[in-house]
Image (spheres, coloured by chain):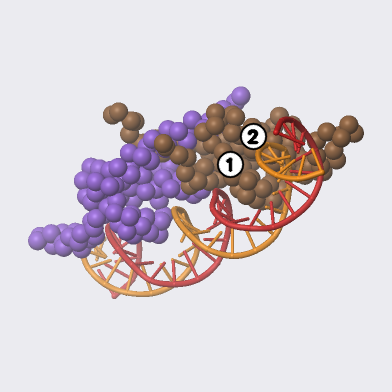
Chain colours: A brown, B purple, C red, D orange
Amino acid sequence: MVEISSDVIRGYNDTMILFILQNGPSYGYEISKQIRQRSDGKYVIKETTLYSAFTRMEKNGYIESFTAEPAADGSGKRRTYYRITGQGQQYYREKCEEWLLTKEVVEQFISKAGA
Amino acid sequence: MVEISSDVIRGYNDTMILFILQNGPSYGYEISKQIRQRSDGKYVIKETTLYSAFTRMEKNGYIESFTAEPAADGSGKRRTYYRITGQGQQYYREKCEEWLLTKEVVEQFISKAGA
DNA sequence: GACGATACAACGACAGGCAAAGGAGGTGGA
DNA sequence: TCCACCTCCTTTGCCTGTCGTTGTATCGTC
């Protein structure tokens, strides 16, 4: 079973989180589920990684947090939501460009399976 | 100017080095030049990164080193050459598989420029 | 003999990922 | 009612790969 190494993903966790946040504010647990689903179960972000990414990105101004109380009907729990900022959008775009370049470079050194 | 971040490449420097070594033994300076050329100048590996990768990979059994004295005609200098091992081949193959998987995952979170 | 290119190495700092652990509220079933 | 399990978040401290800095030495050539 091939697993995704943390080294590869390193630096792209932030990008994935920002991607999710482009569909509107969300919170830790939900984001983690979305990453799992969107990657077809191939990648499950660790909780500590996720929350330390929040801290880092908020400090860098890429995201903003706000607290949402439980709904009036009592459903749900108190949560910390995150919203992407303009800087976050910018950063995301840069990471996308960077990814394209990186991919190009790395693939010069990869031989396809079966070759 | 988009630059390749060390975070992205992290863990794939080894792979690139092993790729080069598949064409036969080589040494630091030469490998570094080949990486630069093959990536079309887009990626230049840092010397310290390169040599610490050698140490690590030799310890892990992925490469073997040997010293070559200057040629009899006096051309060239004393160098430490590296040769890929069977384990190194195996490791390289695994990294290639891993790369394909990782690429698939990351691209689920990347929006193409211009979109 | 000065200068740039070649060739290697030790050291320490840094950042991101993660294991381990803890804790509290919510939900559903036996 | 009680228990298990899910939701939701946080702290601490370690590990690993990268890289800035610095140092050393040889080679070619002008």
Q: Residues within 10 Å of mark 1 (few under 14, many from 20)?
A: some
Residue in the foreground of this view, choosing between A23 and A45: A45
> What number is the disc on residue A33?
2
Up-down relation of residue B73 to residue B90 (above or below): below
Residue A75 screen position, x and y as percent: 83, 33
| Residue A12 picture quarter | top right
Mark 1 lies on a secondary structure that is loop
Residue that carries the numbered disc 1 in the rendered image = A45
In the picture, which quadrant includes the N terminus of chain A?
top left
> What number is the disc on residue A81?
none
Residue at 85%, 40% (x, y): give it: A69
Residue at 49%, 30% (x, y): give it: B104
For the residue marked with disc 2, what is the amino acid?
Lys
Q: Chain of mark 2?
A: A
Residue at 30%, 42% (x, y): give it: B90
Q: CA distance from mark 2 to mark 1?
A: 9 Å
Residue at 38%, 41% (x, y): give it: B95
